[in-house]
Image: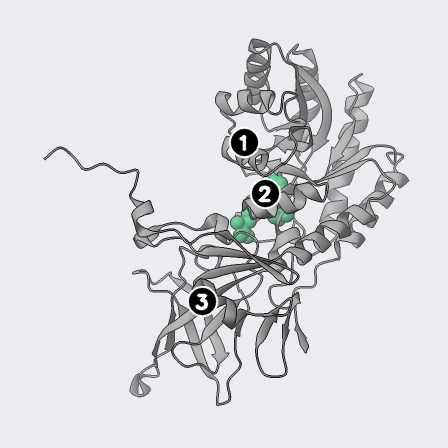
């Protein structure tokens, strides 16, 4: 057996089969069809445990950012393992409650919470959610009104924009000036004073989230320093802050990235909290990608091989049955996702652009990949557990993929493949 980079849950058997926790992906594809997302429950549990163990002995809560993968079975797995959740919509709230998540362990992020979403979150589970991560002054006022109309007091943390560069893709970098997230560092003390003056709110914490797919510890330490400066200023103004939420964003290995281990990130942050005299505070994290990304693959079948014309040096196209609607990261961020044949075959590899059948040139999954392939072969796209299925659409009236959770010896079909009829079930023809 040989392990694959960034995919400790996957291995190549001596007979050439790619296996996930001992299950051949080719066999799963035959049984459930493709495109198929396959997840390792063990890998998800291990990823969460690495945060939790590094935080042992401290007051803490690891809130899984469920936007990364919101399948009920994934949420259930994390709820059973003691995680909290970071949500960004009323839909995510309903979903996580349905999966067994506790309201008292939910933090509610997002720049545009509606009144209805606030109401649902204030009433969730009887107690309401644990905390609202508030991103603007108007949101403070709106939340105060909604809470008072229900006779509740909303626990709030202000999301501060620390203005640090996380060194990541511009679309997923969120901690710099000039993007829509958070309250500017220079305005935060005034915002806390305002929050503390509103009877429908209770200040409980401070938070930030500086971006995603971060591969260094330094930007986190910079952000934490900026947060702690504010905590000191806010407390000097007589407003107590209980928890510090450092957000999510830890990267994973897609190709040759070497992000720090979660345990190393946690220890570095705890050491900085201690050094600055804040070691007593409760610490919250909001990891998404690092809990699920490397725990999942998308399996797809080669439909058509279309070699380039030799006389014009054209590209070789490998057209598969998954497309940008199933996995949009390459099209949207030019993201590089590793690909492995589910069954290795002898023969020379050619260089392929692996593309979907959708009528757009942007519909590609991988470019210039050296693979030995025949039609009917299956390819696993690795590290697809995060921001894969959750970003899927029905473009070209394509039903979304099925999902399988592997739990040791047991296979669970945790989402059936959509049927075409379901795609237009809510539509109505005009009167004829
Ligand atoms: N907390 C907040 C407030 C966030 O906005 C996010 C992600 C997270 C936590 C979790 O970040 P993570 O640990 O997963 O990096 N679709 C993009 C990623 C968008 C991330 C958005 N916010 C992608 O496929 O790369």
Looking at the picture, tell me which residue is in the foreground, 113 or 161.
Answer: 113
Q: Quadrant of the C terminus?
A: top left
Looking at the picture, tell me which residue is in the foreground, 213 or 386.
Answer: 386
Disc 3 to disc 2, how far (Cα)? 25 Å
Disc 1 to disc 3, how far (Cα)? 36 Å
Where's residue 235, x and y in %?
81, 22
Q: Residue furthest front?
A: 410
Contact between labelled residues 2 and 3, with CB atoms less than 8 Å apart: no
**The residue carrying mark 1 has its beta carbon less than 8 Å from ligand 1:** no
Mark 1 against mark 3, which lies toward the viewer? 3
Disc 2 to disc 1, how far (Cα)? 16 Å
Q: Is residue 367 visible?
A: yes
Among the two numbered marks 3 and 2 on one chain, the one whose residue lies closer to the N terminus:
2
Please name the residue that numbered disc 3 is placed on: 300
Q: Residues within 10 Å of mark 2 (few under 14, many from 20)?
A: many
Q: Quadrant of the N terminus?
A: bottom right
Where's residue 395, x and y in %?
34, 52
Looking at the picture, tell me which residue is in the foreground, 369 or 62.
Answer: 62
**The residue carrying mark 2 has its beta carbon less than 8 Å from ligand 1:** no
Please name the residue that numbered disc 2 is placed on: 66
> Going by the image, does 82 lie left or right of 271?
left
Looking at the picture, tell me which residue is in the foreground, 393 or 345.
Answer: 345
Mark 2 against mark 1, which lies toward the viewer? 2
In the image, residue 230 sits, relative to residue 137, either above or below, namely: below
Please name the residue that numbered disc 1 is placed on: 111
In the image, residue 185 sits, relative to residue 321, either above or below, namely: above
């Amino acid at each position: 057996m040989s392990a694959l980079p960034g995919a400790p849950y996957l291995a190549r058997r001596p007979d050439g089969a790619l296996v996930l926790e001992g299950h051949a992906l080719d066999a799963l594809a035959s049984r459930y069809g493709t495109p198929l997302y396959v997840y390792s429950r063990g890998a998800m549990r291990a990823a969460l445990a690495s945060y939790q163990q590094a935080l042992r002995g401290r007051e803490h809560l690891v809130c899984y950012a469920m936007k990364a993968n919101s399948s009920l079975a994934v949420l259930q797995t994390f709820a059973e393992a003691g995680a909290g959740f970071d949500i960004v919509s009323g839909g995510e709230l309903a979903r996580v409650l349905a999966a067994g998540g506790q309201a008292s362990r939910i933090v509610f992020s997002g720049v545009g919470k509606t009144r209805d979403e606030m109401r649902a979150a204030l009433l969730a589970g009887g107690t309401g959610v644990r905390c609202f991560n508030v991103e603007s002054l108007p949101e403070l006022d709106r939340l105060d009104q909604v809470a008072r109309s229900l006779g509740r007091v909303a626990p709030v943390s202000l999301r501060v924009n620390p203005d640090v560069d996380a060194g990541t893709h511009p679309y997923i970098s969120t901690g710099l000036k000039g993007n829509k997230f958070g309250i500017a560092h220079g305005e935060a003390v005034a915002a806390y004073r305002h929050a503390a003056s509103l009877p429908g709110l209770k200040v409980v914490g401070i938070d930030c989230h500086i971006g995603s797919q971060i591969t260094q510890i330094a930007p986190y330490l910079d952000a934490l320093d900026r947060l702690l400066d504010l905590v000191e200023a806010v407390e000097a103004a007589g407003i107590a802050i209980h928890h510090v939420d450092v957000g999510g964003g830890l990267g994973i290995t897609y190709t040759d990235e070497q992000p720090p281990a979660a345990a190393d990130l946690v220890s570095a942050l705890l050491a900085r909290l201690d050094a600055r005299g804040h070691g007593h505070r409760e610490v919250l994290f909001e990891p998404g990608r690092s809990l699920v990304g490397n725990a999942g693959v998308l399996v797809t079948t080669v439909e058509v091989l279309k070699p380039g014309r030799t006389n014009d040096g054209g590209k070789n196209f490998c057209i598969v049955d998954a497309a940008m609607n199933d996995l949009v990261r390459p099209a949207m961020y030019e993201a590089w996702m590793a690909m492995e044949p589910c069954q290795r075959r002898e023969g020379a590899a050619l260089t392929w652009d692996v593309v979907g059948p959708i009528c757009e040139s942007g519909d590609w999954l991988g470019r210039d990949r050296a693979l030995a392939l025949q039609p009917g072969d299956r390819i696993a796209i690795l590290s697809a557990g995060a921001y894969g299925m959750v970003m899927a659409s029905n473009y070209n009236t394509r039903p979304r993929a099925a999902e399988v959770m592997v739990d040791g010896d047991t296979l669970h079909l945790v989402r059936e493949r959509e049927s075409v009829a379901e795609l237009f079930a809510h539509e109505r023809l005009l009167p004829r």
